[in-house]
Image (cartoon, rainbow, N blue to C red):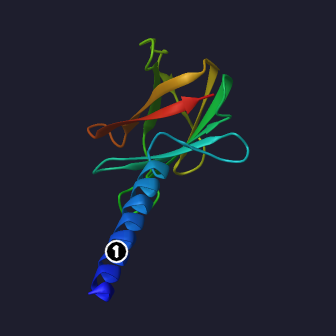
Amino acid sequence: MKQIKSLVTSNRTIAGLAFAMTALLSVAATPLAAATDDDSFFTHLHTEKAMANVTVSPGRAGPVEIAIQLETVDETPLTAKAVSVTLVDTQTGRKLAPVTASRDGEDGWRVKVAQLTPGRWMLGLGISISEADHVSVEAPILIK
């Protein structure tokens, strides 16, 4: 009987640890943004038509550069006709004017933003794949 109780307790402990690890990984994998050593932020955005790897550098108040790499859902380079970036301060509702990105290679785009204030921002991408095919996607970012 003692062995059965010990086995049940062990199973509960393992289940608890698995739950804790799952919770920790889900928090670590949120789309908010992941800080890197150089104080940049990275986030991955995706829809059923396109994916974007976005790096905001630096991830702190002031002027920032946003690098965007586009991919198809099959993870091959996506050549778009145009990309625009919108930024909205989620606390105040202040929306910056949309900025047209400049092409940087086959699937890369860059935007410079003159001044971001600290806080949570909603980053939106408008991707024109062709004259008739447009994709919009957004994700929150954090500016320190």
Left or right: where 126 falls relative to 107: left
Instruction: Name which residue lies at 40% across and 50% down.
Output: 51
Left or right: where 127 falls relative to 49: right
* Viewer-closest of 28 and 104: 28
Identify the image quadrant of the C terminus. Answer: top right
Identify the image quadrant of the N terminus. Answer: bottom left
117 over 12 or under it: above or below: above
Instruction: Name which residue lies at 32% across and 39% down.
Output: 135
11 over 59 or under it: above or below: below
Q: Position of residue 73 (x, y in %)?
A: 35, 58
* Viewer-closest of 80 and 122: 122
Question: Crowding near pointer 1: few (<14 within 10 Å), some, many (20+)?
Answer: few
Q: Secondary structure at mark 1?
A: helix
Q: How many marks?
A: 1
14 over 117 or under it: above or below: below
Q: Which residue is mark 1?
A: 9
Give the amino acid at mark 1: Thr
Q: Position of residue 88 (x, y in %)?
A: 45, 20
* Viewer-closest of 63 and 77: 63
Q: Position of residue 25 (x, y in %)?
A: 45, 57
Residue that sits furthest to the right in the current view: 38
* Viewer-closest of 22 and 54: 22
114 over 135 or under it: above or below: above
Q: Position of residue 91 (x, y in %)?
A: 45, 16
Residue that sits furthest to the front in the current view: 2
Instruction: Name which residue lies at 39% across and 67% down.
Output: 18
